[in-house]
Amino acid sequence: MAETQEATVVFGVLNETSETESRVALTPDIVTRLKRGGVASIIESGAGMAAEYTDEDYEKAGAKVTDRAAVLAEADALGFVDRPSAEIVASLKPGQWVIGMLGSFTDADYIAALEKAGLVGIGIEKLPRKLSSAQSMDEMTSQNSVMGYKAAITAADAYGSFLPMMTTAAGTIRPAKALVLGAGIAGLQAIGTLRRLGAVVTAYDVRPASQGEVESLGAKFLDLGLDFSKGQGEGGYARALTAEEQAQQQAAVDEKAAGFDIIITTAKVPGRKPPVLLTAAGVNGLHRGAVIVDCAASELGGNVEGSAVGEQVTEGGVKLIGAPYLASGVATTASNLLARNVADILVHFIRDGKLSQDLSEELDDALVVAGRAEEPAVKSE
């Protein structure tokens, strides 16, 4: 059995449960893992309940379960599912670390607020995904994988017929035809799940390399007759298309979409408005009872024209589901993965029992988005 080191860093997590959020940034097994590495955990009471983890589970693992004020006061670093609110930022002490998806690509004012408060901000969205040392820290990959799985389940639940072909004494039911737009982590998981449910799956992505990945899962690659040979962007993400390319893609997808029963869109561009992959004309061309699940829906819009968070039914009887919170719907698994991502980032910045930014590595330069303090706060016992 590995020897447990004396705790010198305290890691805190708050209860972020809401109407749309059931995940938690720390699970009991990660409490144990951190404890062995000399990190003590403190968590707000009730934080894990929506993900099926009780306060007793955390206490048995060795975490301190307490109220919010105590977590904020005692933690050297805090991990978040979402980023801390302005109210929480105002409650933190200079030198404390915050780890989460901080929105550093698009919200300079928020990062400036962290700087002004004297906090050290670790923005997971800036993780260099191609670094092998960063794979276990990649929250976007882990949570998008959960999202893709749940998108397929959501579509199957909303669709009014079977997904697999079924032959009965009363006749044969044809399999559902599904189209996945965006073959990144979420898209590939959606493809695999739809295939396992028995649907006939087709997919499309602007990245040329995605065709082989799609076909390896037993799906067809949608031929739009277009060539976006430079579809691969930096860091493993799909690049944003030019206006002309978007128009060409939209017209081609709109035309092809009419032959499908289920459409799932997953094309997010981090920090930017998602590209429209299916226009209103494409939606209107679908048959009554068809289902669309737009994983990119947000206040910025979605991959589907007219998409909004929540479910709506068009005049033509098409169900359009804007679903950005799908990972939260699989809270236990999503939390397990997320907690590991956040914990590995935390541990990466611990040297000689202290939080330190002085590692001089590519990963550090990318992740530290606020408060490059020379003396990060570490509790002294």
Image: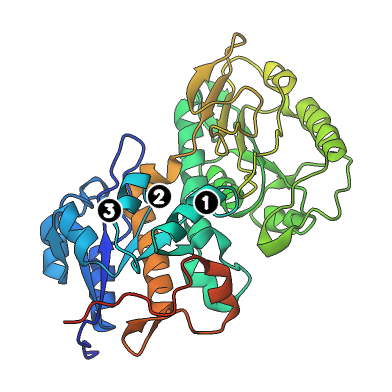
Q: Residues within 10 Å of mark 2 (few under 14, many from 20)?
A: some
Determine the CA span between mark 1 and mark 2: 10 Å
Quadrant of the rendering where the N terminus is positioned:
bottom left
Q: Circle 2 — which element?
A: loop
CB under 8 Å between callouts 1 and 2? Answer: no
Amino acid type shown at disc 3? Ser
Looking at the picture, how far across and down is residue 325, in whole percent?
44, 40
Residue 103: assigned label: 1
Along the line of sight, the residue nearer the viewer: 148 or 171: 148
Between label 1 and label 3, give the one nearer the viewer: 3
Q: Which residue is rendered at x = 20% and y = 54% of the image? A: 53
Residue 91: assigned label: 3
Horizontally, residue 343 falls left or right of residue 62, namely right
Residue 121: quarter of image? bottom left
Amino acid type shown at disc 2? Asp
Residue receiving disc 2 = 82
Q: Which circle's residue, 1 or 2, is located before the other in the chain? A: 2
Determine the CA span between mark 3 and mark 2: 17 Å
**Residue located farthest toward the front when viewing the structure as drawn:** 116
Amino acid type shown at disc 1? Gly
Q: Which residue is rendered at x = 25% and y = 67% of the image? A: 75
Q: Which residue is rendered at x = 65% and y = 39% of the image? A: 274
- Eyeballing the image, is 100 above or below 349? above
Q: Residues within 10 Å of mark 3 (few under 14, many from 20)?
A: few
- Eyeballing the image, is 22 above or below 211? above
Determine the CA span between mark 1 and mark 3: 20 Å
Q: Which circle's residue, 1 or 3, is located before the other in the chain? A: 3
Q: Which residue is rendered at x = 32% and y = 75% of the image? A: 377
